[in-house]
Image: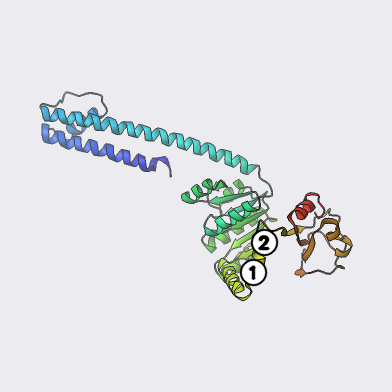
Amino acid sequence: MGFLWNTRLRRGCGLLALVLLAGTIGFMLIEGWTAIQSLFTAVLVVSTLGFSDLRPSDTRGQLLTIVLIVMGVGTLYYLVGVLAQSVIENQLDWNRRRSMQQRVTQLKDHFIVCGFGRVGRQTCQQLRAENCAFVVIDSEEHRIQAINEANYLCVPGDASDDNVLKRAGVERARALLTAVHTDAANVYITLSARALNPALFIVARAATTEAAHKLTIAGANRVISPYILGGRSMAGHALRPAVMDFLDVLVHSEELEMWLEEIRVGPDSWLNGMTIGDAQLRQTTGIAILALRRSSGPLLVNPKDTIVLAPGDTLIVLGSRADVEQAVRRKHLI
């Protein structure tokens, strides 16, 4: 909230107005002055600038003057303190935002999360658990405060605004995840992001089947419905609880030795043109290939050893965290 609408500032201004009103009415009743004369005298007394030609004529007026001086000076000191604090807080907030924007400018191959609602919060927690660099976009003041309290990088503003997306580094980003509260906003964000970065991987939230279709047309690579996923998960846990528990642990657990990961085969990979059998990944890296997604084609589960790998193929692998991280770090697969 801007400091002009700061609650404490409004409270101080209201208290000062009340003191001046009480002084004006008091002088009108006690001294018989006009409203303008009484207000003018009350302002002079509260500001401690002294009196004009009008002065209290009896003890009651003098007592009122004493009360006005005490109340007025106290209120003015309170207002000055609030104003000073507001200016300092705004300066600190500006410095913090400038520093945060500089950090965002340095990001590359990062994730952009649009919306910090219930879905957005869980998304950010998962990205942080995976040690991924990401920035959050939101326009609601209370959510921006929550983002800052969570120590996430934040770009305040409307995620459908091209300038806001550019400030978040959409041209350099690896993926964008949009989970704002309306399907229309998600569609517009997807359109804007796709126009700014044709190669961006976009994951969008949809509440309805119709919205999911529109998001796909708009350029979303994946469309997620929390309601559909939630329903499938509940049914799966009821039908095959052991299998679902295993999958949850395999994908989300940080304590499990085995790790499920996907790795994209790059154009300069030594795997290009080699069959899965000849690559002998289990022998050379200690990881196993569970599935293969071709650059254009369906997902192949338990792919045959005779399949030839090509640039753009994505390997779904299983292995210990150390083996997978070491394989990627040494560029065995990319």
| SS for callout 2 | helix
Q: Tag on residue 251?
A: 2
| Vertical comparison of 272 with 225: above or below | above
| Vertical comparison of 320 with 164: above or below | below
Q: Position of residue 128 (x, y in %)?
A: 62, 51
Give the mark nearest the N terminus, 2 or 1.
1
Q: Position of residue 156 (x, y in %)?
A: 53, 47
Taking 228 as reference, is 296 left or right? right
Instruction: State the image quarter where residue 229 is shown.
Output: bottom right
Residue furthest bottom as drawn: 239
From the image, which quarter does the C terminus lie in? Answer: bottom right
How many residues crowd mark 2 within 10 Å: few (<14), some (14–19), many (20+)?
A: few
| SS for callout 1 | helix
Q: Whole-Å distance between the Cαs marked 2 and 1?
A: 11 Å
How many labels, in total? Answer: 2
Name the amino acid type tagged 1: Met
Instruction: State the image quarter where residue 67 is shown.
Output: top left
Name the amino acid type tagged 2: Val
Query: Is residue 123 something that shows in the picture?
Result: yes
Q: Position of residue 192 (x, y in %)?
A: 60, 55
Question: Of residues 197 and 123, which is closer to you in this image?
Answer: 123
Taking 263 as reference, is 1 left or right? left
Q: Which residue is label 1 attached to?
A: 244
How many residues crowd mark 1 within 10 Å: few (<14), some (14–19), many (20+)?
A: some
Question: Of residues 217 and 323, which is closer to you in this image?
Answer: 323
Which residue lies at the image location 53% right of the left edge and 54% below the top edge? Answer: 116
